Image (tube, rainbow, N blue to C red):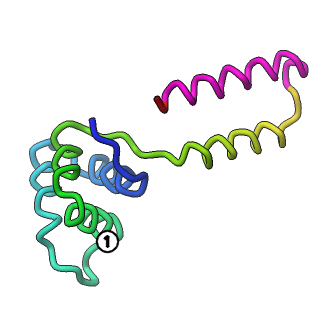
Amino acid sequence: MVRVPKKVADALDYYKQNTPNQDSLKISLMAIPFLVPSNTLNDHSLVLREFALKQPGEYLQAITNGYVPLINTREELANMINDWLNKPYKDGEQKDIKQFANKIFDFIKQQT
């Protein structure tokens, strides 16, 4: 698996969801870097084309071996904290704090 920017992962996911045949998907994704930018290309194609031209090795690895999105850990963690602070307690303050601590721990564990 290779880590790719989130917008690249989203674009790859878009093609995965809209191209049911795996062989057709891989051929389509391999052709994207050679497409000429025009009004007919969608945003997903443009994102993938730009990434493929800048980082061809990672692009090919993502197609063949799979990918995971690069996440801005600080931003994601800040969003989790903000969401938690803006919600009322469900199971009591102490229990909710422990559950939230577990959620943060699991998130950080996934990032390493």
Identify which residue is drawn at 19% across, 36% down.
Answer: 65
In percent of width and height, residue 101 lies at: 72, 23
In the rendered image, the quadrant that contains the N terminus is: top left
Tell how many labels. 1
Label 1 crowd bin: few (<14), some (14–19), many (20+), radius 10 Å = few
Front one among 14 and 96: 96
Q: Quadrant of residue 39?
A: bottom left
In percent of width and height, residue 37 lies at: 22, 80
Residue 76 is left or right of residue 83, and the answer is left
Identify which residue is drawn at 74% across, 20% down.
Answer: 99
In percent of width and height, residue 17 lies at: 31, 47
Front one among 77 and 23: 77
Q: Which residue is mark 1?
A: 42
Q: Could you tell me which secondary element the residue under label 1 belongs to?
A: loop
> Magenta-highlighted stretch: main secondary structure?
helix
Identify which residue is drawn at 58% across, 23% down.
Answer: 106
Looking at the rendered structure, the kind of residue marked 1 is Asn
Magenta extent:
90-110
Residue 21 lies in magenta, yes or no? Answer: no
Residue 27 is left or right of residue 1, and the answer is left
Seen in the picture, residue 79 relative to 110 is either above or below; the reply is below
In percent of width and height, residue 69 lies at: 40, 44
Q: Quadrant of residue 107?
A: top right
Residue 95 lies in magenta, yes or no? Answer: yes
